[in-house]
Amino acid sequence: MPEVEIHIGGRSFEVACQEGEQDYLTSAAKMLDDEAQVLVSQIGHITEPRMLLMAGLMLADKTAGVEDRLRELEAKLAETEGMLQSLQSAEPEKVEVAVIPNEVSDTLAELAARAEALAAEVEDKAS
């Protein structure tokens, strides 16, 4: 079982871990050390047990906030997935487009030609 030397609040600790977990342990120790450094900079000298307790509580507080946010995002994701599923399973909306029969188009064209002819005739008489 490998041992890893970690540094928290200016103190060194030898900690055993499972094979392959060294990086995880080092990363976790770094987070705890960051919190401990905040305490040391604010309070000054602090006993080891108190420093570890307070740094752990500070991390626990941050973790609780992250977990709350995660629950909110999971609920929002579930809602969005539900909406997506309902949209995917919905029948496509049918859109009806009016089709003008050829006879009507022909009649309108004929009326337009007559109107133009009448307009031309009126212009000729007016001039």
Image (spheres, rainbow, N blue to C red):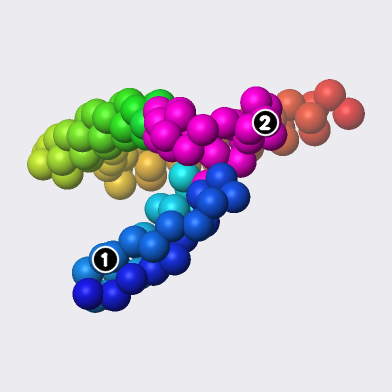
Left-right relation of 109 to 96: right
Quick one: label 2, few (<14), some, or many (20+) residues within 10 Å?
few
Q: From the top left corner, tell me how far across and down residue 124 is, in percent.
A: 80, 33
Camera sees residue 26: no
Q: From the top left corner, tell me how far across and down residue 121 is, in percent.
A: 71, 32
**Residue, x 44% and y 66% (percent of image)?**
5
What residue is disc 1 on? 17
Q: Specify which label sits upstream in the sequence, 2 or 1.
A: 1
Query: Image quarter for residue 40?
Result: top right
Distance from label 2 to label 1 (Cα)?
31 Å
**Residue, x 39% and y 68% (percent of image)?**
4
Q: Between 7 and 80, which is closer to the camera in this rendering? A: 7
Looking at the rendered structure, the secondary structure element under dot 1 is loop
Amino acid type at image mark 2: Gly
Q: From the top left corner, tell me how far across and down residue 56 is, in percent.
A: 40, 35
Quarter occupied by the C terminus:
top right
Q: From the top left corner, tell me how far across and down residue 50 is, in percent.
A: 45, 29
Above or below — where is 15 with respect to 74? Answer: below
Bounds of the magenta span?
A: 33-57
What residue is disc 2 on? 44
Question: In the image, which disc is placed on residue 82?
Answer: none
Report the magenta stretch's main SS: helix
Quarter occupied by the N terminus:
bottom left
Amino acid type at image mark 1: Cys
**Residue, x 65% and y 26% (percent of image)?**
43
